[in-house]
Amino acid sequence: MKYEYSLILRLIVILLIPLKIFYVIFTPLTIFPSYFLLKLFNYEILMSYSDKYFVIGNYTLDFVPACIAASAYYLLFLLILATKDIKLKTRINMFLLGSLLILAMNIIRVEILIIALVEYGKTLFESIHLIFWRFVSVVYVFFVWIFLIKRYKVKSIPVYSDLRMLYKKSLFKKK
């Protein structure tokens, strides 16, 4: 496909796919495995999927949108689409693998937080939650991206490579 058409198509997809879709997809993929893992670890837990909360011990835990980490999947999606010279099959594989890595870490995070709350109390829960929220999640998504570009041998830089190519093709370039 000609470069200009590929760029336009990628931009259209970016504009047409809202963040909300990632919440719809990843909410059940986060909540159900978290619930079943806690059951597997013999925790007495009740789940309300429609209201997105767990009841475990004396605690009611709401799954607010940030718990789903949809913005991490969306960032990955944007990075992949904003990078030129990646074939469609590779883009799909990168997104699937990256999403699987993010999902696995998010489920592990949920499990750690809930177990910390039930076993050690609210103070430890809040401390661990803050560490994950402020530091670990950002660093983890960064390392997932680095892993993906190394694994799939991506040489382009998101946005920058497209801008550079557009400049080369523009009337502004000095000859």
Image (spheres, rainbow, N blue to C red):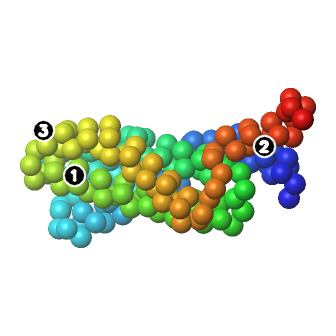
Q: Nearer the viewer, mark 3 or mark 2?
A: 2
- Residue farthest toward the bottom in the current orientation of the protein: 40
Q: Mark 1 or mark 3, which is nearer the start of the sequence?
A: 1
Q: Name the residue under label 2.
A: 165
- Dot label at residue 123: 3
> In the image, residue 136 lies at what x, y percent?
32, 46
Q: What element carries label 3?
A: helix
Label 3 – label 1 distance at C-alpha: 12 Å
Q: Name the image quarter holding the N terminus.
A: bottom right
Is residue 88 found left or right of 29 in the rendered image? Answer: right
Is residue 150 found left or right of 107 in the rendered image? Answer: right
In the image, what residue type sits under mark 3?
Thr
- Dot label at residue 8: none
Relative to residue 104, is residue 109 depicted above or below?
above
Relative to residue 19, is residue 44 depicted above or below?
below
Marks 1 and 2 in Cβ contact (< 8 Å): no
Q: Mark 2 or mark 1, which is nearer the start of the sequence?
A: 1
Q: Is residue 120 visible?
A: yes
User: Which residue lies at the image location 67% right of the left edge and 40% below the top edge?
Assistant: 160
In this view of the protein, which residue sits in the foreground, 126 or 174? Answer: 174
Q: Name the residue under label 1.
A: 114
- Residue farthest toward the left in the current orientation of the protein: 120
Q: Mark 2 or mark 3, which is nearer the start of the sequence?
A: 3
Mark 3 closeness class: few <14, some 14–19, many ≥20 residues within 10 Å = few
Mark 1 closeness class: few <14, some 14–19, many ≥20 residues within 10 Å = many
Relative to residue 175, is residue 109 depicted above or below?
below
Q: Which of marks 1 and 2 is in front?
A: 2
